[in-house]
Structures are given as C-alpha cells and as structure tokens.
Image (cartoon, helix red, strand yellow):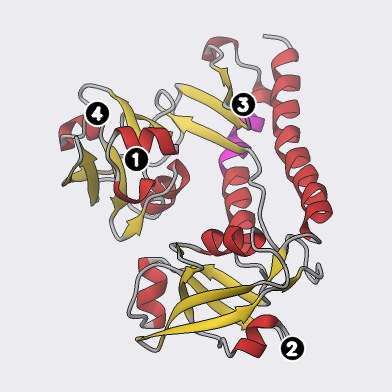
Amino acid sequence: MNSRFVIVALLLFASALSYAENGEKEMRMKSKKQGWLGVGIQDVTPKFAREKELKIKEGAYINEIVEESPADSAGLKKGDVIVDFNSKKIEAAEDLTNAVRETKPGTKAVIKLNRNGENKTISVNIGKNKMRMPFAVNVLHAPRVMMNMFGGDIEGMDLMDLNKQLADYFDVPGGKGVLVKEVEKDENAATAGIKAGDVITKVGDETIKDIGDIRDAIADLEEGNKVSVELIRKGKKTSVSLEISENEVGDNMDWNEEMPGNFNFHFEPPMNMMHKELQEKLKELPQKQIEIRRLQSKLRSSEV
C-alpha cells in the first residue's frame, strides 16, 4: 500500500473542517436578514430534564436572556422551556433556531412555554439579528467523520438517518429516528429481535434523532450491559433489550465520510496492506468525531 491512501484520509478529514468554516462564513452573510429573539438555548433531553427537575422532557431550554432584547422585553426568563413558536412544535433547540431564523424581523410571534411546571403563552416582537455571537442563529452541520467497527455498523445493524419521506413511509410519529437497513445474523441486534425496516426512536432514556444519538446513548455502557431500545415496526411501537458488545475498534474497519448532498465515501483497505501511518490517522478519527459533536452541541446552545 502506498501513501495515496494516507493522502485521501487527510484530505477527507480536512474537508470536514473546511466545510464547517465555509458554513460559518455563509451564515454570517445570511444572518443579518433573519429574526432575533435574544435568548441562549439548549436541548431538553430526558437526562437534562431530570437534572433540572423539569416537568417536560423536550423543548428549548433558555439558559440566558440578553438584556434589552425582544425576549427580555416580552418577559421571557432563564429556566423557561419553549415548546411552541408560532404554532410550530419545538422539540429541541434547533427547532427554535430554525423557527426564529425564518421569522421576519419586526413581526410578532406567539410563544408557548413551560415555567416551573406551568404552561404560559407570551407574545414577542421579533428583532433583527445583530450578530452578537458567532453562529448566532443556525448551525450548519459539519460532515460527520465516523470510524465504524465490525463492518461499519452498531451491534450488527446497518443504519441510516431518516428523512421526511422515509418517516412518512414507515409511519414514524414526529418523523424522527434512525432506520435499520440491515441486520447481521448472530450479532447482538439480531439476538435482541431487531429487524430490517425497524425505526429506532429511543435508546434508554435518550430520544434518537440521528445515528450519532445512538452512539452517544451507548458510549458509556460496558460490555454485557443491556439497554432498552424503542422501535417503530410497521407503524406500531415496540421495544427490545439490546446487549452491548465491547466498545473498541476491531480489525475489520469501515471508514465513512458522510458529506452533504447524499455523497458517501467508502474506504475499506485490506489490513495486510494497510500502511502504519494510515492506521494511526484512522485511530484518531473516533476522537475527532466526538470533538465535532461536542462543538455542534455547544453551537446549538448559542444565542438565537
């Protein structure tokens, strides 16, 4: 094996960083025409809800109110959880980000929220984005660099994120989840009873919106632990118990670089030809993936 594979690896990893940088520049150009509320927000997850003793398990949690902002003038407070914006259901911070972004500055919006367990409705005049913070309105997701193990799957499942058409076809309530494309025989997923065509919507206490959520949900589990997996199968909800295998990279590597526009790069070099330098670079990718996801999570907590 020659150094060409090393060059390919480095180029694809660099593309993830350059895509994120280009996304920042593009958003800075667009943001001035978008709406602004003046709140710092983050996702409400089941775990976060328990920590904050919230009465609800989804929405956009306000962790900051900008002084003299539309939110401040309307009476929004830190600790409020926004669940509806102009009749659009808010399940996560990103939903609110998109809704505010699409609202014309100077118009009025109706916000439904939960404050200390009580539901409230507040009217607010949307302001003009002032670009007080980088990535102030929306986060363009950088490509996800993934080191997949044992054939590029999770516990023997070949997975893909849902789009709206697939969600409608598989009768998935809320339209969010991860589709199981194929299940390998004798792997943990098959033993648990998971089948091709199932849509994973929850792992443990974590609601699943993409493949990364599944990886996060099982990241801290040890080999032999079992976790409840909620599925939609032929439009009906069911659940199974999935055993977790050893969470380390095996010899059979499958490296995928998920790019915008449904472009997928698949690189599966034979181990007996793999260059030592390339092996070292590939070992770094799982940590880079974690760093990118942490950055995305931080950005989703930005001001909107």
The correct choice, above or below, for 95 with respect to 275 in the image is below
**Residue 157 falls inside the magenta stretch:** no
Q: Amino acid at mark 3?
A: Gln
Residue position for label 2: 68
Q: Mark 1: which secondary structure?
A: loop
The correct choice, above or below, for 120 with respect to 183 in the image is below
Q: Are marks 1 and 3 in contact (CB under 8 Å)?
A: no
Any part of residue 48 in sight: yes
Q: Position of residue 82 (x, y in %)?
A: 48, 74
The correct choice, above or below, for 9 with respect to 66 in the image is above
The secondary structure making up most of the magenta span is: helix
Real-space CA distance between mark 1 and mark 3, rounded to the nearest whole angstrom? 20 Å
Q: Position of residue 74 (x, y in %)?
A: 61, 87
Residue position for label 1: 246
Q: Quadrant of residue 132?
A: bottom right
Q: Quadrant of residue 121?
A: bottom left
Q: Which residues are magenta?
A: 279-286
Any part of residue 154 in sight: no
Q: Nearer the viewer, mark 1 or mark 4?
A: 4
Residue position for label 3: 279
Q: Residues within 10 Å of mark 1 (few under 14, many from 20)?
A: few
- Determine whether, in the image, residue 2 is placed left or right of residue 292: right
- Position of the N terminus, as image quadrant, is top right
